[in-house]
Amino acid sequence: MIEIIQPTQFKTVPWKNGKGETVEMAINPDGTLDNFDWRLSMASVVEDGIFSNFTGYTRNLVLIDGNGINLQHNDSKIDRLAKLLDIATFDGGNKTVGNLHSNEITDFNVIVRTSAFNTKTTSEKSADNLLLEKSDLCFIYSLFNSAELSVQNTKEVITLPAQHLMKITDLPTNYASLTGDHLIVVYLTHCT
């Protein structure tokens, strides 16, 4: 099943640590800020500081606007996000401190319960008939321009407008291909 989630359906919710707001794009049915299996969101980071604690979750963070941010985890490992669509994957239970390179940034977040889902987040600066991978859930987000999903062995083409979120449930192998630019593709598969 393919669904397009429009920006008017996104919800603004406070950060778990109360130090900002996030735009919640999608969350599992009956999911709440304190108890969910997966959630996709966008947030602006306007100052250096500690990220919310999401113990038991895996986080994928993608830079979608601004000059970059360093994420320091547990006072040691550092992820440097300097270019548009750079991705960091880290344990949500880490003590993570964000240090901005200069001005505020906007990030795209994928947070999943580690015991429930495996996640793979990719960024595609340019995709031409990129074959999508088999997954239980697939999400596609296009930053600037419309993207097109072509269903294999049919003439069906589905347009994803910029800044809308496409959700595909039970995506089989070789089902569809994607064409567009500045795309984020998220695959979620249940842990077995």
Image (cartoon, rainbow, N blue to C red):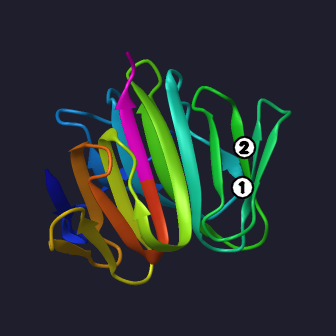
Picture quadrant where residue 95 is located = top right
Q: Nearer the viewer, residue 123 or 44?
A: 123
Picture quadrant where residue 37 is located = top left
Compute the Cα span from label 1 to label 2: 7 Å
Amino acid type of the residue that numbered disc 1 sits on in the rendered structure? Asp
Q: Residue furthest front?
A: 153
At which x and y percent is residue 77? 82, 36
Residue drawn at x 63%, y 54% as measured from the top left: 87
Amino acid type of the residue that numbered disc 2 sits on in the rendered structure? Val
Residue drawn at x 42%, y 50% as measured from the top left: 186
Identify residue for label 2: 97
The overriding secondary structure of the stretch rendered in magenta is strand
Residue 38 appears left or right of 123: left
At which x and y percent is residue 94? 66, 28
Identify residue for label 1: 48
Contact (Cβ within 8 Å) of mark 1 with mark 2: yes
At which x and y percent is residue 65? 58, 73
Graded by Cα atoms within 10 Å as few (under 14), some (14 to 19) or many (20 or more), the crowding at tag 2 reads some
Q: Which mark is residue 110?
A: none
Magenta stretch in the rendered image: 186-192
Q: Is residue 35 magenta?
A: no
Say which quadrant the C terminus sits in.
Answer: top left
Residue 106 appears left or right of 119: right
Picture quadrant where residue 4 is located = bottom left
Residue drawn at x 45%, y 39% as measured from the top left: 111
* Residue 15 in sight here: yes
Graded by Cα atoms within 10 Å as few (under 14), some (14 to 19) or many (20 or more), the crowding at tag 1 reads some
Residue 94 appears left or right of 129: right
Residue drawn at x 75%, y 66% as measured from the top left: 82
